[in-house]
């Protein structure tokens, strides 16, 4: 079975107010790319992936006028994808939902959130992801309230053979100091954002530990907006959000595993794995980053999953297939990350 995660940059802008696909020559939210070209490129990428389920990050907006699931299923029907059914959990106000596009012949799925909306007593499950998490962010003796702007999607999945496993789709808070002006404000906002992101990671890690204690097979996947060497504040906080969710320094039986994270964090290599590519106008060049992960529980790791980043230049098959290479560059600033696992 192939499970993937894919951050599709501003997928929402490819649909009209009525939820219909905008296959026209107007500009998409991607620079110098039309909506028709981006949609066609996405069709090529999804077809080439041929996944059984794709956790879509930045899925189309959900509202009274247009539903995320309907828009994704229209997209799948237009491009003949077997991942033709969609599931989402809690919506949000950012126009960037988290949703699962899946093959109903291969999986039965449902949204299965854990916890409740209130901060629990010690020893009880962490709050539900659409609730509030209380933590002392500033280490000043005052508890702060943390919320997810994009609550993670918790999925309970079952194969036709009766094998169950869980998926948690994640889009962690960006650390970028958006809207800040001047070096002091930029520094302050960047540190505040990192604190909030680490709090979200701690909250998510609590849920991971609950599932591992229950013996659940678990995948945690999506865009963590974090990784090695991404900003100058890493040493200030000691650990990244990715390391927290993985349980990097914890006993092996409570760790999650991601092959690309192990390569990136375990050793300083000349050749790093990357899952995203951004243009930095002030430097006149592209910047590569590892932001997207598929983390698995110890029992799933023991099944020998194979990771793949569908990078247009680093993956030999993607690079040698010109149509796919160009489609990956046109479709999004992130590239899909998949695992093949014998579920």
Image (cartoon, grey):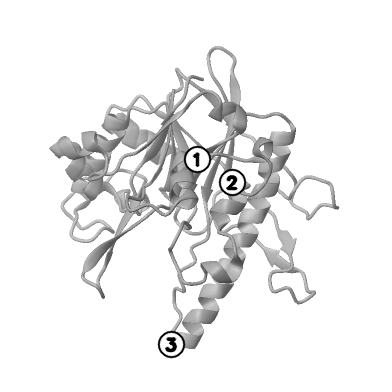
Q: Secondary structure at mark 2?
A: helix
Alpha-carbon neighbours of circle 3 within 10 Å: few (<14), some, or many (≥20)?
few
Q: Is residue 96 visible?
A: yes
Query: How far separated are the C-alphas under marks 2 and 1?
Result: 8 Å
Crowding at label 2, few (<14), some or many (≥20) Cα neighbours within 10 Å?
A: many
Above or below, comparing residue 194 to residue 8 in the picture: below
Q: Does residue 31 appear to the left or right of 116 in the view shown? A: left
Point out residue 155 in the picture as x, y percentages from the top left corner: 58, 34
Viewer-nearest residue: 4 or 267: 267
The answer for how far apart the CA atoms under marks 3 and 2 are is 35 Å
- Label whose residue precedes the other's in the sequence (1 or 3): 3
Quarter of the image for the N terminus: give it.
top left
Asked whether disc 3 touches disc 2, contact meaning CB atoms under 8 Å apart, the reply is: no
Which residue carries the number 1 mark? 258
Name the residue located 35 percent from the left edge and 24 percent from the top edge. 82
Residue that numbered label 3 is attached to: 182
Q: Which quadrant holds residue 139?
A: bottom right
Left or right for 32, reference 183: left
Q: Nearer the viewer, mark 3 or mark 2?
A: 2
Q: Nearer the viewer, mark 1 or mark 3?
A: 1
What residue is drawn where x is 74% and y is 31%?
A: 214
- Side (left or right) of 10 relative to 242: left
Check disc 2 and report the residue beneath it: 246
As drawn, 85 above or below 122: above
Of residues 320 and 110, which is closer to you in this image?
320
């Amino acid at each position: 079975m192939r499970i993937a995660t894919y951050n599709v940059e501003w997928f929402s802008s490819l649909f009209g107010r009525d939820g219909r696909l905008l296959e026209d020559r107007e500009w998409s939210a991607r620079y110098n790319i039309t909506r028709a070209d981006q949609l066609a490129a996405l069709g090529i990428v999804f077809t080439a992936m041929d996944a059984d389920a794709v956790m879509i990050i930045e899925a189309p907006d959900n509202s009274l006028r247009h539903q995320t699931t309907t828009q994704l299923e229209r997209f799948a029907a237009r491009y003949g994808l077997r991942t033709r059914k969609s599931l989402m959990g809690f919506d949000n106000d950012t126009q960037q939902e988290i949703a699962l596009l899946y093959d109903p012949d291969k999986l039965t799925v449902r949204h299965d959130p854990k916890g409740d909306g209130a901060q629990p007593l010690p020893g009880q499950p962490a709050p539900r992801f659409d609730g509030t998490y209380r933590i002392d962010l500033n280490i000043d003796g005052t508890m702060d309230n943390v919320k997810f702007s994009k609550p993670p999607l918790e999925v309970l999945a079952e194969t036709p053979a009766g094998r169950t496993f869980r998926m948690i789709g994640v889009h962690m808070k960006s650390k970028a100091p958006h809207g800040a002006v001047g070096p002091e404000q930029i520094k302050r906002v960047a540190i505040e954002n990192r604190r909030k992101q680490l709090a979200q990671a701690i909250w998510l890690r609590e849920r991971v530990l609950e599932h591992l204690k229950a013996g659940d097979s678990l995948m945690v996947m999506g865009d963590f907006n974090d990784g090695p060497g991404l900003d100058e504040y890493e040493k200030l906080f000691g650990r990244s959000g990715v390391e927290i969710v993985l349980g990097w320094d914890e006993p092996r039986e409570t760790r999650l595993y991601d092959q690309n994270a192990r390569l990136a964090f375990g050793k300083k290599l000349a050749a790093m794995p990357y899952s995203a590519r951004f243009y930095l106008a002030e430097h006149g060049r592209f910047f590569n980053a590892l932001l997207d992960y598929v983390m698995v529980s110890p029992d799933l790791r023991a099944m020998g999953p194979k990771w793949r980043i569908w990078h247009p230049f680093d993956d030999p098959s993607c690079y040698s297939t010109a149509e796919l290479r160009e489609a990956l560059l046109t479709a999004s600033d992130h590239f899909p990350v998949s695992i093949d696992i014998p579920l």
